[in-house]
Structures are given as structure tokens and as C-alpha cells.
Image (spheres, rainbow, N blue to C red):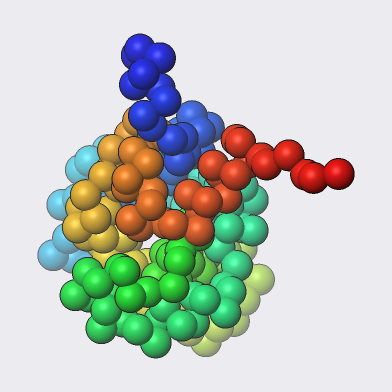
Amino acid sequence: MSDNERRATLERYSTGERTNHWLVALAFLLAALSGLALFHPALFWLGNLFGGGPWTRILHPFIGLFMMVVFLLLAGTVWDDNRMQSADWQWLRQLKDVVNNREEHLPEVGRYNAGQKLLFFVIAACLLGLLLTGLVIWRAYFSLYFPIGVIRLASVVHAVCAFVLICAILMHIYAAIWVKGSLHAMLRGTVTPGWAWKHHRAWFRQITHAAHPRTRPD
């Protein structure tokens, strides 16, 4: 990449953030497929991807634990950027402008918009629910410590959390495709200044000010 090309782009995601994101995505895919195989007999054929039914039952909870660990590492780096601000609530109140792509009418957006922030917390809540209920129904290690009624309730909550998480991830994928340049940012780590100004203006101001701070007058 030439010097001019470097100056024409802004770093949105570091190599570590992108690697972590795709590890979470891979773990989610494997956990979803193995979970669906165990959820209903009509989907049991998906277990062949993991070596059959017994291996699917063995691997599914460990894949889930791996997903939780890598997500926590990612969450630790983006937590501050996902805190809701007053401008975010105003952004949500103007959802009609969001849907109609009238971003010039919206409050300036930081690194993440309010929709992305809410999605982050939905995913975090679902993963926490999956972790807690998954431990309860994990027959090999923990389920013997709980009464059958608790195990049955945990199974239902586990399925609900998984359903909400799958819907949330599908929404995330749709939004990434809908907003041109988002996939490139997660694949290559960079965006153009024009993209940053249009979609995340407050973040653009923040990073450009950090790169070129004004000299304080005496």
C-alpha cells in the first residue's frame, strides 16, 4: 500500500479486534449448528458435521465455552465504546430517519451507533444466559447437582436465548451488508474518511483530533 493510500484510509479495527471478531463468528457458527442438531430430530443430521451424535453432544458445550471466552476478550476492548449516551437515545427516537437513510438528520454517531450498542448488549445477555443454563444442563459434569425441574426450565431458557442470539446475529449480518463498507472494515480494518464522516461523524472527529491535536494557546 502506498503512502497516499494509507493517508486515504482510517483504521477502524485493529488486527487483534478483527481476529477476535472472526473467532467469535466461527465459534457461533459451530455452536449454532451443533445446538440445532441437538434441538430437534429433524435437524439431527447436522451432527454429521461433528462426527455424529455422541461427538456433537461432547463438543457443543466446549465450543460454547470457547465462544464465551473470546467474546469476553472482545467485549473488554469495546466496552467503553458501547456505553449508551444521551445522543444514542435521540438516535433511537429518530428511527424513521435511520430506516430511510437520512443520516444528516441524526445526532452525530461515535464509534458505534445506538443500534449496534443495543445489539452488543443483547448478544452479551444471551451469551450469559446460554452459559448459566448450559452449565445446568451439562450432563457430564453439572446436571446431577440440580433437580429435574430446574434442568427442564434451564433447557427452555437455553433454547430461547439461542433463538434470540441467532436472530441478533442475522440482524448483525444484514446490517453489515446494508451499510456499504462495513464488511471491508472488518476484513481489512480500514474505512475511508468519507465513510467515517457519513456514518460515524463523532468518531471521525475524535480520531482525527487525536491524530492532529491543536496546539493550546499560551
Figure quadrant of the N terminus: top left
**Residue 201 location in percent, x, y?**
44, 57
Q: Nearer the viewer, residue 59 or 148?
A: 59
Q: Is residue 85 visible?
A: yes
Vertical position of residue 7 compared to residue 186: above or below: above
Q: Position of residue 103 (x, y in %)?
A: 30, 68
User: Is the residue 35 above or below the residue 98 in the image?
Assistant: above
Quadrant housing residue 181: top left
Which residue: 57% across, 79% down?
Answer: 86
- In-front residue for pair 121/65: 121
Q: Residue at left 15%, top 52%?
A: 45
Q: Quadrant of residue 55?
A: top left
Above or below for 97 versus 10: below
The answer to whether 215 appears left or right of 159 in the picture is: right
186 or 46, which lies in front?
Answer: 186
**Percent position (x, y) of residue 115?**
39, 70
Q: Quadrant of residue 143?
A: bottom right
Looking at the rendered structure, the number of numbered marks drawn on it comes to 0
Q: Quadrant of the C terminus?
A: top right
Q: Residue at x 37, y 41 (%)?
A: 193
Q: Is residue 133 visible?
A: no
Residue 140: give x, y in percent of width and height: 54, 55
Front-lying residue, 137 or 184: 184
Above/below status of 105 relative to 110: below
Q: Residue furthest front?
A: 218
Q: Which residue lies most toward the top here?
A: 2
Picture residue at 73% right of the left edge, 39% below the top: 215
